[in-house]
Image: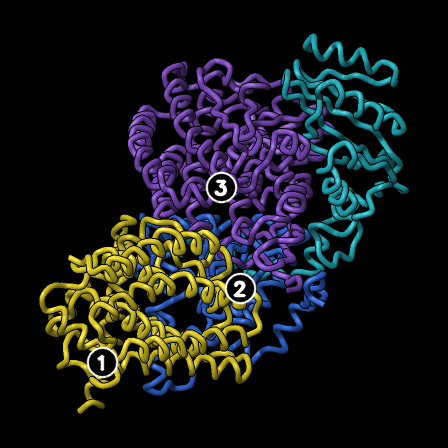
Chain colours: A blue, B purple, C yellow, D cyan
C-alpha cells in the first residue's frame, strides 16, 4: 500500500470520527438500526449520524439481503456518493446468501458487485454487533485500510462485468428513467 | 407550472422500509401516484415449497420485520388446521402473550414513528427505546431479539418460566407508567393536531371497498377486529375492548394504536392469570426427526389480527414432507398498492409519508 | 484596526456557533434520554466534509455556493458584538445594510441549489423563500417601530440608547415577535420546513456533497451568528463582550429547547401562523410605539 | 358449519358446487370456471364482502392451475374458499376488479408469478420483478436453485475437515 501523506492521515482521522450513514433501509437488518440510533445504544455518541441523501453520506449500509431490483438502485446510490465512501454489509445474506441461498431474486455475495469494507455476521446482527462494526470501521479508516472506494475505481471493469452478469442491465427502465 | 416527476423512495428518509412511490407533483399537490413495490421480493412462497414443514418456521418470520411472530403463529395455525392437531392449552395462552407483546412493540414503534414524518423526533426516540424493553422479554424467552422462531407447529418451543413471567409483569407496569408521557408529548400537541387532524380522510365505504383492515378500518367507526369476529386462540375467553373512532383521519388512526397498547396490556395480564400451570407446551411432532413430519392432504386459511390488520396464511399440502403451496396475505396489501394509487392524488407531498406511517404500509409483507 | 476587529468577529462566530451547535446536539440528546455526541463533534463533521471529493453541478451551482458564503461572511463582519468597542465598522452597521447584505447570501443559496437541477432542491428553495416571506414581515414591522422609537438605525447606537432598560422590557410585544421570527430564521422546529428530511429529503441540500456541504455549513454558522447577534444587540441591550456571549448562549439554548419538543408545521400553516398572531402583535406594538405607550 | 354459513351454502346450490368443510367457520367451494364470477357475486351479496386473498396453486400433475378466492365476512367471521381449476397450458380467466378493486393488483401478481391472463384487466405490467427473463417463477417446474447458481455466483469455501475436527475436539481455537 502507498504511504499516506500527512494531510491524508489528518483527513482520515477526521473521517473516522464523523461517519454519516445513508438512511436507506435495503433489507430487514434495518430493523435493528432504530434501537442502535436511539436512546438505548445511541450511536450518535460515536459521531455516526443518519443523512438523507447519498451525496452527503460517507457510508452505505447494506442491511441484509439484496434482490436484483434493489441492487440496481444500490449501484446507482453507491456511484452517487462522494469519495471516500465505505460500505458495511449486514447479516449473513450479504456474505453468502444466508437463508435465501436458493432464492431466484436475491444475490448471494455482495462484494462481487460493490466493494465491502466490513461485514457483520448474524441474522439479524444485534445493536452491539453494529456498534462494534462501526468501531472496527473507524479503526480501519484511521489506519487508511478502508480503501473500498479506491478498489472500485481501479477494478471498475470487473465490477461492471459482474453487475451485468447478474442483472442483465444495470440501468433502470421505468416511466421515470427515460 | 407543469407537473414534476418525483420519486418518493426507495432511498428517502420518510420512507418506511424499502418501497417506492412515484409521484407527479404540481406545486405541493400530488396529481398522480403510482406504487412501485418489489424491492424486498425474495420469493418466499417459492422458498417455502422447497423446505420441510418444520424448517419453514426458521424462514417465515422474515416476511414481516416489525412484528415477526404473527407469521409463525399464522403458519402454525394453518398447519394445525390441516393436520387436526390439538395444541396444549398452556401453549395457546403463551402464544397469545407473545402475540400481544409483539403488538405492543409494534404499536410503540408506530406511535413514536409518526414523529418521523412530522419532525417530532423525541417521540420516535422514546418509542424505540421503550420497545427495547419488550425485546428484552423476547430475548429472555426465546433467545433472539427480533426473529424469535418461537411459535412452532403444535405449540411453542419452550416453556414460560416464572422468572420471565415476573419480568413481563414489571415491563407492563413500566410501559403503562410511560403512557401518560406519550399522551402529553404527542396527543396533546397542538401543532400535531393541525398536521394530522382531518388529513388523509377515509370514509367507511371507501375503507370497506378498498379492503383495508385493522386500524385503518376501525378509525372509520366499525368494530371489525379478527380477534372478535373470528376468535382464534383464546381471545374469546379474555375481556378486552376494540377501540374505535369515527373520524377516519390520520390522527384517529395513530390514537387508536395508542389506545390498543393499553388493551393489549390488559389481555396479557388476564392471560398470565388464567394460564394453567404445567410443562406441556408442545405436542410430539412425529416419530423420529421433526423435519420428517408429514402433513395430510388438504388446504386451509388461517388469519389473525396483526398490528396492521388481517394477516393470513393459505397453506396447501399434498401429503408430503414439504408444503405444496403457501400464500401470504400481507396486511398492508390494499392500502400499500391500491390505496396509494387511489387516495394519494389530491393530497400534499407532506401527507405521503403520513399515509405510509399511519396506514402502516409495511413493504416486506407486500413484496414477500 | 477595523479589519482586525472584523476578522475577530469571524473567528468568534466560527468557534462560538460551531461549539454551540455541538452543545445543542448534546441538549437534544439529554432530552431524548441518551448521551449524545461530544461538543466538538461539529468541528470534526465540518473538517471531514471539507476533506471529501465532491461533485459539482455546473458553474451556477458553484457560484451560488460561493455567493452564499460571501454574503454571510460580509454580514458577519459588520455585526457589532455587544458594544461600540467590538463594532468593526461603526459607520456602516446600519440595520438596512445588514438586511440587504444578508439577503445576498440567501439568494446565492437559492440560486445555487436550484442550479443543481434536483426537484427536491427546487421545492426546498421555494419553501425557504416562502418562509422568509413569512417571518420577515412581522420582523421588519417590529424593527421599523424600534427604529422609529430610537430615531436611529445604527446598531451600536441602539445598544447605547438601551442603557436605561432593555428593549425587550421597553416593548415586550416586539421582543416576543422578534424571538418567534428568530426561530424561523434559524430554521429550528417548528419552522424547519425547508429542510424537512422526511418530506423533501433535506430540501436545498439534497445535491450538496463534500466541500460544498462544508462551505454551506460555514455559511449557516455565520448566518446563525448574524441572526442571534441582531436579536441580542437590538432587544437585549448588548453589553460588554462577556455579557454579550452569555446572552447569546441563553437565546440559543432557549431556541434549542423549544425546538426539541415540537413537530414541524406544514408550509401553509407556517404562513398562516406568522401572518396571524405575530403580525397582529407587531402591528399592535407599532401602534403603541406611535402613541408613545411604551414601558 | 355455522347455521348462517349453511344458509349461504344452500343459496349456492344452483351453481352445482362441491362443498368441503374444513372447520367450523371455513368452507371450501369448488365450482367450474364459468360459474366462479356468479358464485363470488352471490357470496358478496350475502355479506362475504371482504376479499382476504386471491391466489393460485399450480397442480402440475393434473396440468391445471387452481385459482383461489378467499372471502371473509365481518358479520359472522365465516370464510369461504372459492376455488376453480383452469388449464395450465393456456391459463386464461376473467378479472374480478369490478367486484374488488384491489384484485387488480392480485391479478397483476398472479400474471407475473404464474402467467395467468385475466381478461378485462389491461394493466399487466410486472409488479415485483424487473427484467425477468425466465418462465413465471412460482410455477412448479421452475427451479430457483438452478437460476440462482446460473446468475448469482456463490462464495467458495475451502473445507478443511481435519482443522474443523480439531476445533470440535477443542484442540485448537477456531
Percent from the top left, x then y, of residue B69? Answer: 50, 34
For label 2, the residue is C123
Subunit under mark 3: B
Subunit under mark 2 = C
Q: Position of residue B151 (x, y in %)?
A: 50, 30
Left or right? Give the position of B100 relative to D63: left
Number of marks drawn: 3
> In which quadrant of the rendered image does the N terminus of chain B lie?
bottom right
Q: Earlier in the sequence, mark 1 or mark 2?
A: 1
Of residues A64 and B174, the one nearer the viewer is: B174
Distance, label 1 to label 2, CA atoms, is: 34 Å
What element does badge 3 sit on?
Answer: loop
C129 vs B365: above or below? below
Residue C36 at least partly seen: no
Quick one: quadrant of the C terminus of chain B? Answer: top right
| Picture quadrant where residue C224 is located | bottom left
- The percent coordinates of residue A152 (x first, y second) are 54, 75
Q: Residues within 10 Å of mark 1 (few under 14, many from 20)?
A: many
- Residue at 31% in and 33% down: B180
Q: Residue C102 is drawn in which quadrant?
A: bottom left
2 or 3: mark nearer the eye: 2
* In the image, residue C130 above or below residue D164: below
Nearer to the camera, A153 or D14:
D14
The residue pinned by badge 1 equals C9
Mark whose residue sits in front, 1 or 3: 1
Residue under label 3: B66
Question: Residue extending furthest front?
Answer: C291
Left or right of residue C35, residue B119 in this image: right
Q: Chain of mark 1?
A: C
Amino acid at each position: 500500500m502507498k504511504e499516506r501523506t500527512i494531510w491524508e492521515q489528518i483527513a482520515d482521522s477526521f473521517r473516522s470520527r464523523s461517519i454519516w450513514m445513508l438512511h436507506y433501509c435495503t433489507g430487514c437488518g434495518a430493523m435493528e438500526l432504530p434501537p442502535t440510533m436511539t436512546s438505548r445504544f445511541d450511536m450518535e455518541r460515536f459521531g455516526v449520524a443518519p443523512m438523507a441523501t447519498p451525496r452527503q453520506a460517507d457510508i452505505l449500509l447494506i442491511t441484509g439481503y439484496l434482490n436484483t431490483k434493489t441492487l440496481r438502485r444500490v449501484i446507482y446510490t453507491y456511484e452517487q456518493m462522494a469519495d471516500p465512501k465505505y460500505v458495511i454489509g449486514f447479516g449473513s445474506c450479504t456474505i453468502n446468501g444466508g437463508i435465501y441461498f436458493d432464492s431466484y431474486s436475491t444475490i448471494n455475495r455482495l462484494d462481487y458487485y460493490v466493494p465491502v469494507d466490513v461485514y457483520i455476521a448474524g441474522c439479524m446482527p444485534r445493536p452491539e454487533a453494529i456498534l462494534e462494526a462501526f468501531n472496527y470501521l473507524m479503526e480501519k479508516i484511521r489506519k487508511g485500510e478502508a480503501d473500498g472506494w479506491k478498489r472500485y475505481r481501479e477494478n471498475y471493469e470487473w465490477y461492471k462485468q459482474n453487475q451485468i452478469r447478474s442483472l442483465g442491465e444495470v440501468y433502470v427502465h421505468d416511466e421515470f428513467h427515460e | 407550472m407543469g407537473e414534476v416527476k418525483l420519486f418518493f423512495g426507495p432511498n428517502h428518509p420518510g420512507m418506511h422500509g424499502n418501497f417506492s412511490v412515484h409521484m407527479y407533483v404540481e406545486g405541493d399537490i400530488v396529481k398522480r401516484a403510482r406504487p412501485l413495490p418489489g424491492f424486498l421480493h425474495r420469493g418466499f412462497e417459492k422458498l417455502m415449497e422447497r423446505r420441510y414443514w418444520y424448517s419453514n418456521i426458521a424462514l417465515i418470520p422474515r416476511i414481516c420485520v416489525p412484528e415477526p411472530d404473527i407469521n409463525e403463529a399464522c403458519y402454525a395455525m394453518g398447519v394445525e388446521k390441516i393436520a387436526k392437531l390439538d395444541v396444549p392449552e398452556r401453549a395457546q395462552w403463551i402464544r397469545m402473550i407473545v402475540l400481544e407483546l409483539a403488538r405492543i412493540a409494534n404499536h410503540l414503534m408506530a406511535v413514536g414513528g409518526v414523529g418521523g414524518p412530522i419532525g417530532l423526533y423525541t417521540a420516535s426516540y422514546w418509542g424505540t427505546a421503550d420497545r427495547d424493553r419488550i425485546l428484552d422479554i423476547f430475548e429472555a424467552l426465546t433467545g433472539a431479539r427480533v426473529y424469535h422462531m418461537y411459535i412452532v407447529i403444535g405449540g411453542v418451543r419452550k416453556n414460560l418460566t416464572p422468572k420471565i413471567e415476573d419480568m413481563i409483569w414489571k415491563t407492563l407496569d413500566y410501559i403503562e407508567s410511560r403512557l401518560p408521557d406519550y399522551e402529553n408529548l404527542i396527543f396533546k400537541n397542538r401543532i400535531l393536531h393541525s398536521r394530522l387532524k382531518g388529513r388523509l380522510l377515509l370514509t367507511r365505504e371507501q375503507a370497506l371497498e378498498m379492503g383495508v383492515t385493522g386500524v385503518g378500518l376501525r378509525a372509520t367507526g366499525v368494530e371489525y377486529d379478527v380477534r372478535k369476529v373470528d376468535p382464534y386462540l383464546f381471545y374469546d375467553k379474555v375481556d378486552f375492548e376494540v377501540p374505535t373512532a369515527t373520524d377516519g383521519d390520520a390522527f384517529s388512526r395513530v390514537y387508536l394504536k395508542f389506545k390498543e397498547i393499553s388493551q393489549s396490556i390488559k389481555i396479557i395480564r388476564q392471560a398470565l392469570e388464567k394460564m394453567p400451570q404445567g410443562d406441556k407446551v408442545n405436542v410430539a411432532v412425529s416419530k423420529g426427526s421433526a423435519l420428517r413430519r408429514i402433513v395430510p392432504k388438504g388446504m386451509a386459511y388461517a388469519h389473525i389480527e396483526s398490528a396492521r390488520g388481517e394477516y393470513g396464511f393459505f397453506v396447501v399440502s399434498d401429503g408430503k414432507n414439504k408444503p405444496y403451496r403457501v400464500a401470504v396475505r400481507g396486511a398492508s396489501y390494499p392500502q400499500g398498492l391500491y390505496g396509494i394509487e387511489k387516495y394519494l392524488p389530491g393530497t400534499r407531498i407532506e401527507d405521503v409519508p403520513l399515509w405510509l406511517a399511519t396506514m402502516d404500509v409495511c413493504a416486506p409483507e407486500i413484496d414477500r | 484596526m477595523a479589519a482586525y476587529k472584523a476578522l475577530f468577529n469571524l473567528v468568534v462566530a466560527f468557534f462560538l456557533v460551531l461549539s454551540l451547535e455541538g452543545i445543542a446536539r448534546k441538549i437534544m440528546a439529554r432530552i431524548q434520554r441518551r448521551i449524545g455526541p461530544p461538543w466538538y463533534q461539529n468541528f470534526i463533521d465540518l473538517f471531514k466534509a471539507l476533506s471529501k471529493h465532491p461533485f459539482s453541478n455546473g458553474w451556477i451551482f458553484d457560484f451560488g455556493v460561493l455567493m452564499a458564503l460571501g454574503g454571510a461572511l460580509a454580514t458577519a463582519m459588520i455585526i457589532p458584538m455587544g458594544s461600540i468597542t467590538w463594532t468593526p465598522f461603526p459607520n456602516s452597521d446600519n440595520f438596512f445594510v445588514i438586511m440587504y447584505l444578508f439577503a445576498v447570501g440567501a439568494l446565492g443559496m437559492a440560486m445555487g441549489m436550484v442550479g443543481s437541477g434536483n426537484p427536491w432542491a427546487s421545492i426546498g428553495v421555494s419553501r425557504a423563500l416562502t418562509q422568509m416571506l413569512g417571518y420577515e414581515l412581522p420582523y421588519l414591522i417590529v424593527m421599523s417601530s424600534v427604529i422609529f422609537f430610537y430615531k436611529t438605525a445604527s446598531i451600536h447606537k441602539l445598544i447605547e440608547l438601551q442603557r436605561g432598560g432593555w428593549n425587550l422590557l421597553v416593548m415586550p410585544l416586539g421582543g416576543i415577535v422578534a424571538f418567534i421570527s428568530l426561530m424561523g430564521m434559524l430554521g429550528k422546529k417548528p419552522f424547519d420546513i425547508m429542510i424537512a428530511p422526511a418530506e423533501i429529503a433535506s430540501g436545498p441540500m439534497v445535491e450538496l456533497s463534500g466541500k460544498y456541504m462544508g462551505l454551506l455549513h460555514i455559511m449557516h454558522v455565520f448566518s446563525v451568528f448574524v441572526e442571534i447577534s441582531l436579536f441580542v444587540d437590538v432587544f437585549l441591550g448588548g453589553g460588554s463582550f462577556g455579557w454579550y456571549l452569555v446572552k447569546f448562549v441563553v437565546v440559543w439554548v432557549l431556541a434549542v429547547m423549544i425546538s426539541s419538543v415540537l413537530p414541524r408545521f406544514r408550509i401553509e400553516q407556517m404562513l398562516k401562523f406568522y401572518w396571524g398572531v405575530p403580525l397582529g402583535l407587531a402591528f399592535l406594538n407599532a401602534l403603541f410605539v406611535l402613541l408613545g405607550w411604551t414601558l | 358449519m355455522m347455521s348462517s354459513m349453511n344458509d349461504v351454502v344452500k343459496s349456492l346450490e344452483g351453481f352445482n358446487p362441491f362443498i368441503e368443510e374444513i372447520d367450523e367457520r371455513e368452507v371450501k367451494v369448488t365450482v367450474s370456471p364459468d360459474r366462479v364470477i356468479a358464485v363470488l357475486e352471490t357470496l358478496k351479496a350475502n355479506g362475504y364482502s371482504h376479499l382476504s386473498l386471491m391466489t393460485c396453486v399450480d397442480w402440475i400433475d393434473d396440468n391445471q392451475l387452481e385459482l383461489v378466492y378467499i372471502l371473509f365476512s365481518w358479520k359472522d367471521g365465516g370464510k369461504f374458499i372459492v376455488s376453480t381449476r383452469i388449464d395450465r397450458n393456456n391459463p386464461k380467466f376473467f378479472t374480478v376488479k369490478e367486484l374488488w378493486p384491489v384484485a387488480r393488483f392480485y391479478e397483476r401478481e398472479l400474471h407475473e408469478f404464474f402467467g395467468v391472463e385475466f381478461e378485462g384487466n389491461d394493466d399487466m405490467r410486472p409488479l415485483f420483478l424487473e427484467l425477468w427473463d425466465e418462465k413465471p417463477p412460482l410455477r412448479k417446474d421452475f427451479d430457483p436453485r438452478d437460476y440462482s447458481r446460473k446468475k448469482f455466483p456463490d462464495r467458495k469455501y475451502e473445507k478443511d475437515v481435519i482443522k474443523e475436527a480439531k476445533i470440535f475436539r477443542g484442540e485448537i481455537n477456531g
